[in-house]
Image: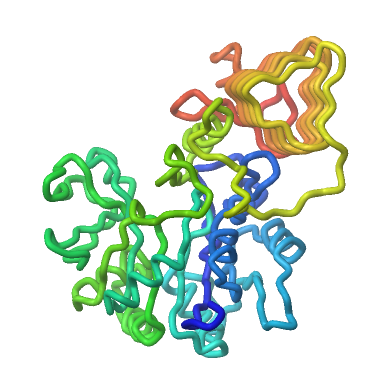
Amino acid sequence: MRGGPSVLGIVLAGGEGKRLMPLTADRAKPAVTFGGTYRLVDFVLSNLVNADILRICVLTQYKSHSLDRHVTTTWRMSSLLGNYVTPVPAQQRLGPRWYLGSADAILQSLNLVHDEQPDYVAVFGADHVYRMDPRQMLQAHIEGGAGVTVAGLKVPRAESSAFGVIVPRPDSRHITSFLEKPADPPGLPGDPEHVHASMGNYLFSTKVLIDALHQDAADPDSAHDMGGSILPLLTGRGEAQLYDFDDNRVPGETPHEHGYWRDVGTLDAYYEAHMDLVKDRPAFSLDNREWPVYTYNDALPPAKFCAGGFAGESVVSPGCVIRGQVTGSVLSPGVVIEPGAVVQGSVLHAGVRVGRGAVVRGAVLDKNIEVPPGATIGVNPDKDAELYTISPGGVVALGKGARVGERG
């Protein structure tokens, strides 16, 4: 931060993303397209950059080519001012092994911290959809005097097994315990049906982070994970505090959007987050000029609607040609909908073509899929189940370049 404490951003982007298959069959989860023109990693990077955290390392590992290319071509900062966003692949600095966990990823990349010598290190996840001003979290961290500050948001207690759960003292933000995906955690004081779930965003005082990583590395029984290992370690030492996401106020946000955060790690969550975008009053708006989401945009013409072409309550990207009927859907650049085709409640990635008279309903189609004339997806559940990936919630998903009507 210019004129203030120095902060190094570390974005954890090495996850495999198995629950988001087949979208992650050919790319890392943070590189998956979201909202038509963005990649998932763009949301965390935009939050950091908007907050003047301008030296950022993106730690990658799994099928990282697409992610590395996106970061290097899109996120070009001013080298004159010493700012950068750079992908950092697994380098085996501590021996011939890949990352054992998220904490080990940072341990193996401590040269980045030693080179910058920041006052604080912001360790953020790479695959959530949200807006946040990290400057406010940093201020709370400094004022609280903690070794680590963990961003948390309220979720129903019944959903706690999907999250790391933060248990704070009733009278303060001091964390008494950190439970990784517990089945039966204690509820909040005065609100027993909710808990504070970790958002996967941490602010560390630099020395505390380095010491904790080395202590964790010496434990042969550790999972070497940030949430499962480092946070319980620092909580046990009394050095962890909670930052309530509800306290964060993002410039330009509406009251309707306040507190929006989605973990899109499953097909159903990914699909539902897209449906949030297409509502008349969206739960999350991509249009905030005071806190924009940045990404790379190809030199494409505006979307074109031909005679009979229609799109209602939809997000339509540049380069699309609409000759059929589209409702409640998100279309990435270069999608073509031919005459008589119907697309309903679907997410179509770049280069998808829906042929004349075809029907696509409740589906996610990855890049460059051609739906033949008259074909149907999402209409016959039994047939779809034989050919495609079907989520527990019934979303039909086809991977990159899949051939419609053939088993993937």
Residue 175 located left or right of residue 407: left
Q: Is residue 244 above or below residue 129?
A: below
Pick whichever, 348 or 189, lies toward us.
189
- Count of picture labels: 0
Residue 353 located left or right of residue 24: right
Residue drawn at x 81%, y 18% is 355
- State how the image is colored: rainbow
Coordinates of residue 319 in the picture (x, y in percent): 83, 36
Residue drawn at x 84%, y 35% is 302
Q: Is residue 327 above or below residue 212?
A: above
Q: Quadrant of residue 22?
A: top right
Coordinates of residue 272 in the picture (x, y in percent): 50, 32
Pick whichever, 329 or 286, lies toward us.
286
Residue drawn at x 64%, y 50% is 39
Coordinates of residue 301 in the picture (x, y in percent): 87, 38
Residue drawn at x 66%, y 19% is 312
Pick whichever, 224 or 365, lies toward us.
365
Residue 7 located left or right of residue 45: left
Pick whichever, 91 or 51, lies toward us.
51
Quadrant location of the C terminus? top right
Q: Is residue 287 above or below residue 344?
A: below
